[in-house]
Image (spheres, grey):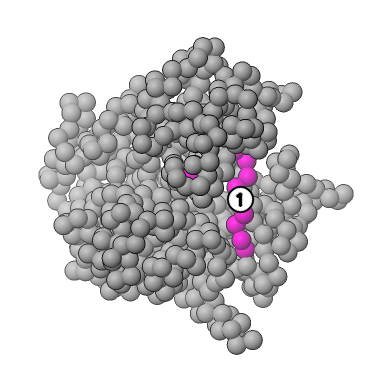
């Protein structure tokens, strides 16, 4: 009884802190992202806001740069409602770039800097950007996308010497007087309108541009930091990409909203993680589950318990990793949350138990829009009852999580994607009553009798690998562009000891494919996490009567050579080449001798 009361008190106090922090965020107000950040600058001006290597910026210096970006917009006639694509790696200037764009009412489109080729061009094209800021350290990626870019895009090279095909962004900023623009240049926009664009794979196909409203971004920035009791003395270590909401809004916002500093690292490195945490004096970090698993698999580090970290915030921390992680690395507090960038369902686990992604207690159900309905894994459909309505899942029954769409509450709106077709695919209608509408998360969960939610799996064609969503249609589309490949069926397979699923492709070719050339092709066209880990060279593909690929039998067979009569290959991380899987290789992958 005492432990239950203590847990309840912890949950309520944390929720109250979070609700208080977002209470002023109103979709009908004109308090926009730029106003939010300017408010923090006014409150914490001389405090250090960002750290990268040996470079630091205060809140005031951050705004100075942002004001120059805003002035650059004015000089180049980039107006309110226009979109500027940001193709920039993790660096000190990242937040100030999009901060400056929002000061003029311009919409930043944060492009995944790991993309290249057609996938990169696709994201830039659908962003509808008129200008793009290109980190010159990513020039090779950018050039690989150039043949597929739409016309009319003005390119600006940043953080280096720009080639003749680009205008120099750094030099252009030097001529700008860094004055704060008047608020009225942003017009009569409300916080419920689009503030930025982030990209997600969704459930199928190429990445989609998700509309992130001002109010949603502010909720991300305020809420979870309040749950973690963040203050001006905190230092948040950011190893996740800043184009992601977890790192770029939740993590950064937890520090920025409370006067603390964000430590920006170029990427996650398990070997130097604890050195960085100690050297920079980190008190918090954001995670995805795979990051924690990687750290747990490393040899003991002399500094792994000598840090100052008190809170970690993130998602995807699996039960089998959770307890071992906090015990080994001396982590006092974990905030596990759930929520898609474009979705309207949010959950948070402030008080345990291990493995839960959040909780909706019975006495607060009316405050949430979440439910779980039955899902048929074989058909991929949500079955309906005799009355035509969806069937609610029982406690401890796995089903698909959905969120009711309510236009009168900014938290529960679904603002969708840039295309109407993509938006409509994510909406279920007439679910529990005529005329209602619910957002399909595409995630399978179960709920226990205490209201705790547990993530079980993703549905559909998208799977998780290396902390990223991988859309099978996107990978198949790239594979089909390789000479000789006539069919490509892509799916995820389970591998012992890894979160998510590894990408596997069954390919049909009119000639024996040159695997060395195929590997080079995939390296050019796909980010590392989307490249197939396994290849299956098939004679034909099994399809439905409507020519849709069947995947069930392929997934069941996995990469086990004893269950497959066709050649199977894996990408050897040592040789960086596709090599055949035999019984010995299969065993070594599954027992961890060979790491993928």
Residue at 39% x, 71% y is: 330
Q: Is residue 381 left or right of residue 568?
A: right
Quadrant for the C terminus in the image: top left
**Looking at this rendering, what residue extends furthest in the right direction?**
386
Circle 1 sits in a helix, a strand or a loop, which is it?
strand
- Residue under numbered circle 1: 457
Q: Is residue 453 left or right of residue 25?
A: right
**Picture layout, residue 93 above or below residue 419:** below
**Residue 445 among those drawn in magenta:** no
Q: Nearer the viewer, residue 150 or 256?
A: 256
Q: Position of residue 356 (x, y in %)?
A: 57, 65
Residue at 52% x, 79% y is: 10
**Picture layout, residue 532 above or below residue 488:** below
Residue extent of the magenta highlight:
453-465
Residue 481 visible, this angle: yes
**Looking at this rendering, what residue extends furthest in the bottom direction?**
2
Which quadrant of the structure image shows residue 432?
bottom right
Q: Position of residue 445 (x, y in %)?
A: 64, 56
């Amino acid at each position: 009884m005492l432990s239950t009361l203590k847990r309840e008190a912890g949950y309520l106090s944390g929720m109250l802190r979070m609700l208080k922090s977002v209470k002023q965020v109103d979709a009908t107000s004109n308090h926009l992202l730029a106003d939010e950040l300017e408010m923090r600058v006014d409150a914490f001006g001389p405090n250090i806001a960002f750290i990268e290597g040996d470079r630091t910026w205060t809140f005031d210096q951050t705004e100075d740069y942002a004001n120059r970006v805003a002035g650059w917009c004015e000089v180049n006639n980039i107006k309110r409602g226009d979109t500027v694509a940001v193709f920039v790696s993790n660096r000190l200037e990242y937040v100030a770039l999009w901060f400056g764009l929002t000061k003029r009412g311009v919409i930043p489109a944060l492009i995944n800097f790991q993309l290249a080729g057609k996938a990169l061009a696709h994201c830039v094209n659908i962003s509808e950007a008129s200008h793009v800021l290109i980190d010159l350290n990513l020039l090779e990626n950018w050039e690989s996308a150039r043949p597929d870019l739409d016309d009319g895009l003005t390119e600006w090279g940043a953080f280096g010497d720009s080639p003749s095909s680009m205008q120099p962004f750094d030099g252009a900023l030097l001529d700008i007087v860094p004055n704060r623009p008047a608020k009225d240049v942003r017009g009569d926009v409300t916080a419920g309108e689009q503030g930025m664009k982030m990209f997600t794979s969704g459930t199928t196909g190429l990445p989609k541009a998700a509309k992130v409203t001002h109010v949603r971004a502010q909720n991300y920035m305020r809420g979870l930091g309040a749950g973690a009791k963040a203050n001006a003395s905190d230092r948040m270590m950011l190893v996740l990409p800043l184009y992601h909401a977890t790192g770029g809004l939740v993590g950064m916002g937890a520090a920025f909203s409370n006067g603390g500093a964000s430590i920006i690292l170029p990427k996650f490195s398990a070997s130097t993680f604890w050195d960085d945490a100690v050297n920079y004096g980190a008190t918090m970090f954001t995670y995805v589950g795979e990051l924690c698993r990687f750290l747990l698999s490393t040899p003991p580090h002399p500094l792994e318990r000598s840090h100052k970290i008190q809170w970690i915030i993130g998602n995807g921390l699996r039960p089998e990793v959770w307890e071992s992680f906090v015990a080994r690395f001396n982590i006092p507090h974990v905030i596990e949350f759930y929520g898609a960038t474009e979705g309207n369902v949010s959950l948070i686990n402030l008080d345990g138990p291990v493995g839960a992604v959040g909780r909706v207690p019975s006495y607060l159900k009316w405050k949430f829009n979440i439910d779980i309905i039955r899902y048929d894994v074989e058909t991929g459909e949500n079955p309906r009852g005799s009355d035509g309505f969806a069937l609610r899942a029982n406690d401890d029954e796995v089903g698909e999580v959905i969120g009711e769409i309510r236009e009168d509450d900014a938290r529960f709106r679904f603002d969708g994607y840039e295309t109407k077709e993509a938006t409509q695919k994510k909406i279920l209608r007439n679910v529990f009553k005529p005329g209602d509408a619910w957002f399909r998360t595409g995630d399978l969960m179960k709920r226990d009798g205490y209201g705790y939610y547990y993530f079980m799996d993703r549905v559909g064609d998208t799977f998780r690998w290396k902390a990223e969503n991988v859309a099978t249609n996107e990978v198949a589309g790239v594979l089909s562009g390789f000479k000789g490949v006539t069919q490509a069926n892509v799916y995820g397979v389970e591998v012992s000891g890894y979160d998510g699923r590894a990408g596997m492709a069954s390919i049909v070719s009119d000639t024996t494919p040159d695997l060395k050339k195929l590997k080079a092709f995939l390296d050019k066209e796909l980010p590392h996490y989307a490249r197939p880990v396994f290849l299956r060279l098939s004679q034909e593909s099994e399809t439905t009567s409507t020519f849709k690929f069947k995947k069930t039998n392929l997934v069941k067979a996995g990469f086990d050579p004893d269950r497959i009569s066709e050649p199977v290959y894996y990408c050897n991380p040592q040789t960086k080449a596709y090599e055949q899987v035999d019984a010995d290789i299969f065993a070594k992958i599954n027992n961890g001798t060979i790491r993928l």
